[in-house]
């Protein structure tokens, strides 16, 4: 007989070793009593109630939630976790006529999501390109991707959420909250899921989206790279400066023809062969081909070196995967007639089914182009010890434009006037000691930002909650006096705390950076 809480995986079961860990191989110490895999909202409710009613142990007390498993820290998989509720079997999607919205379950991955939405409605959402990330975490942290400068953030289209919450008596209830709710508590619950982060208020089971943008018929996507052995410090400064100046200038005003163009600059460690540049634009935008070529010329202006075919990864995405799916993807420097439009429904990236790398990530929102002292810190760390192979990159994503049309309080995402977003990344094999790699990224980050973190000011605006960084809690690395909660949420944090007190008064859903009561 099927259990009302779904499938139960216990130690000794063949699936246990796979399901006790997430994507980041850095976190392998979790040994939960069991993992639950519910298949619908009712089973989530039953699974959570069962876990709450079981005897708790101080050394292993947390109940954690996983949708796609891409959390960068040990918020889901850690030694103090007693039960993991895994939503990966909840991957349904349908048009909800009663709600007047497109409904998706929290375990649906971005790859599945784009395909289902496109095939059923011809619509899309401006979400991420890492196809195995699931909606439950991606959306609740804000969500952004290659269409965000054209259409905004993923949460800008969130109309309703269904959440399994735990009341003061320890009873689980399924609650649906919408953007239009008159009840202030329900409105807070919806709002808290528009960028308040996952694992804070309850278990998100389903989400509804309205007013979705039309999917592009096709996109123009181009990439290339500068050879590191041809780049000195002056050229490096010009590359970073040109990229920042371009997106500081093009922020989606009524006459900005570049409003829909998304660019990525991947500053790989100098032990890698190249620095990478990527751009994408909706092929239906007027003069799209000329715009993407002009972008190449603007970023390469004054460098005195050609862009070559890209042979290294762009951030987390292996080149082989990108080339495999985007077989017609163009390289900067090709003749104009060879810059081919790729159909939108084949543009999702292929991701590795099982990751064997450990990783550490940090982030920063930029309100301006990078100042000289930040570029100096980048140059020194990226060129440190070139002879030692280091799998590290500082990825600079373009931002703003349509993202910045909303006000900071309209959603829980407070950063609504940034022009770029940085992700600092380092990786190492799971069977190797990572202490040197952690030293490298922590030192780089401390040297880039006064006080060791990108405090909200006229240049920087804190950190992205979906790139969680536990070092923000550590006074050894954050000497700014600005807490992690301000770096993620700014002035929105008190309202998130209000929602926490109302909907999770027992602090059931907690981790190292969960919203505090």
Image (spheres, grey):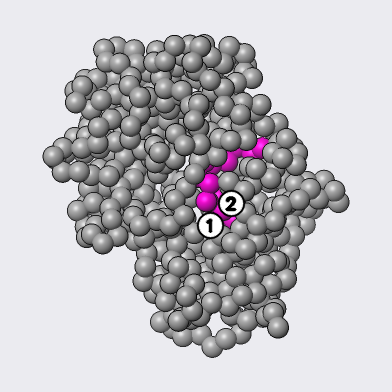
The residue at the point 19 percent across, 53 percent down is 436
Name the N-terminal-most of marks 2 and 1: 1
Q: In the rendered image, which quarter is residue 184 located in?
A: bottom right
Q: Could you give the CA–CA distance between mark 2 and mark 1, rounded to whole angstroms?
A: 7 Å
Numbered mark located on residue 109 in the image:
2
**Quarter of the figure with the C terminus:** bottom right
Q: In the rendered image, which quarter is residue 229 located in?
A: top left
Q: Is residue 420 left or right of residue 287?
A: left
Image coordinates of residue 399 in percent, x first then y, are 49, 31
Front in this rendered view, residue 254 or 306: 306
Q: Count neighbours of disc 2 (C-alpha within 10 A) and say few if under 14, some if 14 to 19, many if 20 or more.
A: many
Task: State yes or no: discs 2 and 1 in contact (Cβ < 8 Å).
Answer: yes
* As drawn, 413 above or below 243: below
Residue at the disc numbered 1: 68
* As drawn, 345 above or below 247: below
The residue at the point 40 percent across, 13 percent down is 297
**Quarter of the figure with the N terminus:** bottom right
Let me know if residue 35 appears in the view.
Answer: yes
Magenta extent: 124-139
Let me know if residue 298 appears in the view.
Answer: no
* As drawn, 35 above or below 186: below
Q: Secondary structure at mark 2?
A: loop
Image coordinates of residue 378 in percent, x first then y, are 25, 35
């Amino acid at each position: 007989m099927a259990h009302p809480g779904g499938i139960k995986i216990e130690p000794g079961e063949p699936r246990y070793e796979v399901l006790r860990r997430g994507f980041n191989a850095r976190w392998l110490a979790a040994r939960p009593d069991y993992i639950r895999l519910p298949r619908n909202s009712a089973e989530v409710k039953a699974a959570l109630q069962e876990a709450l009613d079981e005897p708790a142990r101080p050394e292993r007390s947390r109940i954690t939630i996983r949708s796609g498993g891409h959390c960068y820290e040990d918020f889901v998989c850690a030694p103090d976790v007693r039960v993991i509720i895994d939503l990966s079997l909840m991957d349904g999607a349908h048009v909800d006529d009663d709600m007047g919205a497109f409904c998706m379950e929290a375990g649906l991955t971005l790859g599945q999501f784009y395909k289902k939405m496109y095939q059923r409605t011809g619509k899309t959402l401006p979400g991420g390109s890492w196809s195995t990330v699931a909606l439950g975490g991606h959306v609740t942290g804000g969500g952004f991707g290659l269409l965000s400068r054209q259409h905004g953030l993923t949460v800008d289209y969130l109309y309703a959420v269904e959440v399994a919450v735990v009341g003061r008596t320890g009873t689980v209830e399924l609650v649906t909250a919408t953007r239009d709710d008159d009840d202030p508590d329900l409105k807070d619950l919806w709002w808290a899921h528009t960028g308040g982060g996952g694992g804070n208020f309850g278990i998100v089971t389903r989400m509804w989206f309205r007013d979705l943008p039309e999917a592009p018929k096709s996109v123009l996507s181009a990439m290339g790279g500068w050879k590191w052995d041809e780049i000195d410090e002056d050229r490096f400064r010009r590359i970073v400066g040109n990229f920042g100046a371009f997106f500081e200038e093009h922020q989606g005003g009524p006459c900005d023809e570049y409003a829909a163009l998304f660019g990525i600059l991947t500053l790989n460690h100098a032990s890698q062969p190249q620095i990478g540049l990527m751009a994408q634009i909706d092929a239906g935008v007027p003069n799209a081909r000329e715009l993407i070529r002009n972008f190449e010329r603007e970023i390469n202006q004054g460098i005195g070196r050609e862009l070559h075919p890209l042979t290294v990864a762009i951030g987390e995405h292996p080149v082989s995967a990108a080339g495999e799916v985007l077989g017609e993807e163009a390289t900067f420097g090709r003749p104009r007639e060879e810059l081919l439009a790729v159909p939108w429904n084949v543009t999702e990236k292929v991701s590795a089914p099982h990751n064997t790398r450990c990783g550490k990530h940090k982030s920063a929102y930029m309100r301006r182009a990078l100042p000289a002292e930040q570029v100096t810190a980048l140059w020194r760390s990226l060129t440190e010890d070139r002879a030692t192979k280091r799998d590290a990159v500082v990825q600079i994503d373009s931002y703003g434009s349509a993202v910045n049309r909303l006000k900071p309080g309209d959603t829980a995402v407070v950063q609504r006037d940034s022009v770029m977003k940085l992700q600092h990344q380092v990786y190492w094999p799971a069977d190797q000691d990572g202490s040197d790699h952690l030293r490298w990224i922590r030192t780089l980050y401390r040297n880039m930002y006064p006080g060791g973190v990108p405090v909200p000011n006229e240049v920087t605006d804190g950190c992205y909650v979906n790139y969680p960084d536990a070092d923000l809690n550590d006074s050894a690395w954050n000497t700014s006096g600005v807490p992690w909660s301000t770096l993620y949420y700014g002035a929105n944090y008190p309202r998130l705390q209000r929602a926490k007190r109302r909907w999770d008064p027992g602090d059931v859903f907690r981790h190292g950076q969960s919203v505090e009561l």
